[in-house]
Amino acid sequence: FSFFQERLRYMLVLLLLLHGTDSFYVPGVAPINFHRNDPVEIKAVKLTSSRTQLPYEYYSLPFCQPSKITYKAENLGEVLRGDRIVNTPFQVSMNVEKKCEVLCNFPNKPVVLTVEQSKLIAERIREDYYVHLIADNLPVATRLEFYSNREEEEKKKEKDVQFEHGYRLGFMDGNKFYLHNHLSFILYYHREDVEESQEHTYRVVRFEVIPQSIKLEDLKADEKSMCTLPEATGSAPQEIDPTKENQLLFTYSVHWEESDIKWASRWDTYLTMSDVQIHWFSIINSVVVVFFLSGILSMIIIRTLRKDIANYNKEDDIEDTMEESGWKLVHGDVFRPPQYPMILSSLLGSGIQLFCMILIVIFVAMLGMLSPSSRGALMTTACFLFMFMGVFGGFFAGRLYRTLKGHRWKKGAFCTATLYPGVVFGICFVLNCFIWGKHSSGAVPFPTMVALLCMWFGISLPLVYLGYYFGFRKQPYDNPVRTNQIPRQIPEQRWYMNKFVGILMAGILPFGAMFIELFFIFSAIWENQFYYLFGFLFLVFIILVVSCSQISIVMVYFQLCAEDYRWWWRTFLVSGGSAFYVLIYAVFYFVNKLDIVEFIPSLLYFGYTALMVLSFWLLTGTIGFYAAYMFVRKIYAAVKID
């Protein structure tokens, strides 16, 4: 499998990083040097639409095909994304212009689309599909020029240029469908410096397309497959009538331009973001809010705690006669094991696994190792890391299970290795069946599914067992106070101590710190944008960890002050409160930003959203739980208990 080779490469990179060496190899693509007249291969990736969320492979539509179709061997990430990279019949040579050429069939024999094919093309145009091609691993982009709201004088001078990924398959005018059957490729090259005696070498640094719809009668083609394009004003577009057969020609032209852009920065065009200011503003805003709140919370908690501990430790007779109140009262029950300790430790183990995976992925991506040029690398790395982090998940789950007086460690390890991954696999399998039914390339092929299952039971499960074994054998966490034989009665709680109110209150701060970043992540996932701001994401992740920990400590302090010692499950649930807001945000995004109307795309959106929310709840719940557990152990260690 090519993804095993890719994995080995990442392992090497990680090892080099851990050794702290200065030189490390950034996985991606080495530059390809072309000489004049060298062929530049144009490949097709897939067709996508943000309205249906179902990618299709290029030849699912009746485009011109080469004599032999060859698919590129793909890594795990590409397969999961629905990429099916395949060759196309476009003949492009380095720095060789082509005015207009017919792509397939001879000029006197236009391509005939059957009624079925015409219907399919019309449907794809209505669903707003985009075609994605690549040349030298650079995706094709359509240039969009528009005037920004500047002063009138400036308007005349400059237009704002943005790029759209891929090109539109066609367009609608009223109830008529028009197909883009002529592609004008504009490729930019950078001329490399060479010695005088040597031949010039070129590198491809940008790949643009201007799609046009030109009627068959207006494309004047000769016997040599050359054609002449009509004047822009006088031509009619190529209509596709879904009720009858249609005749048309697929044509293309190639234009080369020299560019100052170096090969190293050729992706900048695709990643130009007009929202970097928004990002900085949101990050600074989040940091200020979090640190301000942290300061207030820390001051309140530390001052209150100091007072509490000082009072509790006064050994005056007067104190003894007075009624005790507050969190010291529950010292004999605070470490009483909760219900279902195996499930709790299993969920926390999966949370640790997710935490380690996300931390490493964001960190490695921040160093620029998972750039968009190495397709599918992010997904491949995340899958493998989750498998390998099973050893840490198992260790923490095993140790906690031992602390909670659990005895059946083998069952606990099995539960840790299968509970969360089983839910993920189940939801993905059901969604995959629907995608299969639509014949989309987004469906995970059966061999890949078997490979994923083998990885789960062949890598993840044994590693979780290994970690669990060592965690269970290790000394359990040291609780500073003994647990009483008879559980204490819990007084009636106020309304605001309700679990759901706690979830609502605790979720606001972490969600507020990250919701702008969430918008960009959603755009990347659902609207086929590139996401590359991993430096920002790393900062946001750290802010999230800090805010979850603080909120969790405050909530557990209030709960113990109300003499309710059942904090284990509650802390885990309440700390994950921001996941509830992520769910609400996902619904808001679906209604306001996406144009999805059909049942299966909606099902896919909410299915994947459910997975995201579940994973996010596990992650934030685990962070909050461990913060609260450390806090509880610290405060009870600080008071003298007779």
Image (cartoon, rainbow, N blue to C red):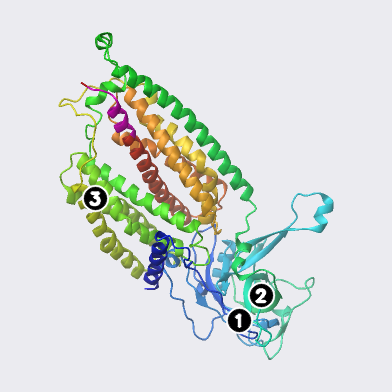
The local crowd at label 2, few if under 14, some if 14 to 19, many if 20 or more residues have their Cα within 10 Å, is many
CA distance for labels 3 and 1: 55 Å
Q: Residue furthest right?
A: 153
Q: Is residue 282 above or below residue 251?
A: above
Amino acid under disc 2: Tyr
SS at circle 1:
loop
The image quarter in which residue 109 lies: bottom right
* Residue bearing mark 3: 415
* Residue bearing mark 2: 189
Of 526 and 149, nearer the camera is 149
Residue 639 within the magenta-colored segment of the rendering = yes
The image quarter in which residue 147 lies: bottom right
At 46% from the left edge and 58% from the top edge, which residue is drawn? 364
The quarter of the image holding the C terminus is top left
The local crowd at label 1, few if under 14, some if 14 to 19, many if 20 or more residues have their Cα within 10 Å, is many
Amino acid under disc 1: Phe
Which tag is nearer the camera, tag 3 or tag 1? Answer: 1
Q: Residue furthest bottom?
A: 223
532 left or right, relative to 500: right
Q: Is residue 465 above or below residue 6?
A: above
CA distance for labels 1 and 2: 10 Å
